[in-house]
Image: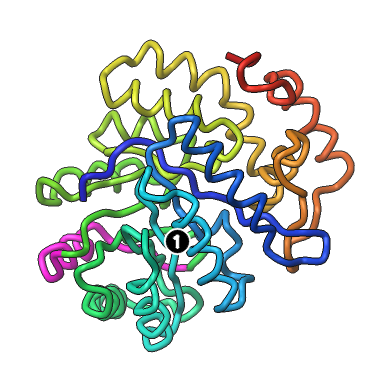
Amino acid sequence: MKTTGCGTAIVTPFTPSGAIDEPALRALVDWQIDSGIDFLVACGSTGEAATLDEDEWLFAVGVVADAAAGRVPVWAGCTHNSTRTLVRQAEQLKHIPGVDAVLSANPYYNKPSQEGQFQHFLALARAVDPLPITLYNIPGRTGVNLEPETVLRLAEAAPNIQAIKESSGKLPQIARLVHILPDGFKIFSGDDNLALASIGVGAHGLVSVAANEIPAEMGRMIRSALANDWTQAHVLDRRYARLIDANFWDSNPTPVKTVLSLMGRISDHVRLPLVPPSAATRGRLERLAEELGLLQPAAVRR
């Protein structure tokens, strides 16, 4: 996998009736790419994939891939706690033009052992081969951690397992991955607030929530760090640290959708069991967005 840099875990916009808002999603993709983002992740956690019906999930992935039109790589989120279901669903991604990789998180709820996770991801790899796979370790949502040694076993067992999005929040674990994985295997931070530290120990980029709101700025921050321009990277990190934190004042992606709605890009609708933020939280988000200049046109912000 050649992808590096900053990718956006793009939201899935909904209409007031609850349907996927295709025009808004296409407009988001265009804006992201025009802003210089390096790649896009469709239907991840931030894309509310867990609340999409299977046909909606395939539709949303197809829209992102079609709108991107080869201008940047597109990863398709595909996660399930049943390996049989995961394999069946993932096989469908091979037939969607423009999907460059599959992003798949640990099996949730079952709490499998390391061997169980190994067999789960190996089955996925064989089902979608030669499509590349990015493992997605997010124990805070799934209840299990994917140990670095298991990642190494997977990299050795399946050549199309080529990257990991590491969202354990544990910098020593990211460093361990850097130390033991083969050259060419890509490691991406899954936490905006650990992105620079992760790159500092050898990671190759970030899959970002905040890039939904500030794609140009997050992309510039990550590329600066990768180019060893730490002065520029730290300037951007300090400027937008409050926004990065604010995106988790409520369950993701509720805050980021609220900010995007304040920016006039999408509606703020989320699907149950997520609910809109409280009036107090919405007010805090609006004040912060205004202070950061996000409610002005991008050309003015720069």
- Image quadrant in which you'd find residue 53: bottom right
Residue depicted at x 21% and y 73%: 129
- SS of the residue under disc 1: helix
Q: As displayed, is residue 293 above or below residue 161?
A: above
Which residue, given by chain and number where applicable, does mark 1 sit on? 139
Amino acid of disc 1? Pro
| Residue with the most extreme right position | 279
| Residue with the most extreme top position | 231
State the image coordinates of residue 139 (x, y, percent, origin top left): 45, 61
State the image coordinates of residue 30 (x, y, percent, origin top left): 53, 41
Residue depicted at x 44% and y 63%: 77
Residue 252 shown left or right of residue 137 in the figure: right
State the image coordinates of residue 13 (x, y, percent, origin top left): 67, 55
Q: Nearer the viewer, residue 200 or 285?
A: 285
Residue depicted at x 13% and y 65%: 159
- Image quadrant in which you'd find residue 302: top right
Magenta part of the chain? 143-159
Residue 49 shown left or right of residue 38 in the figure: right
State the image coordinates of residue 1 (x, y, percent, origin top left): 21, 51
Residue 161 shown left or right of residue 59 in the figure: left
Asked if residue 188 lies in the magenta stretch, the reply is no
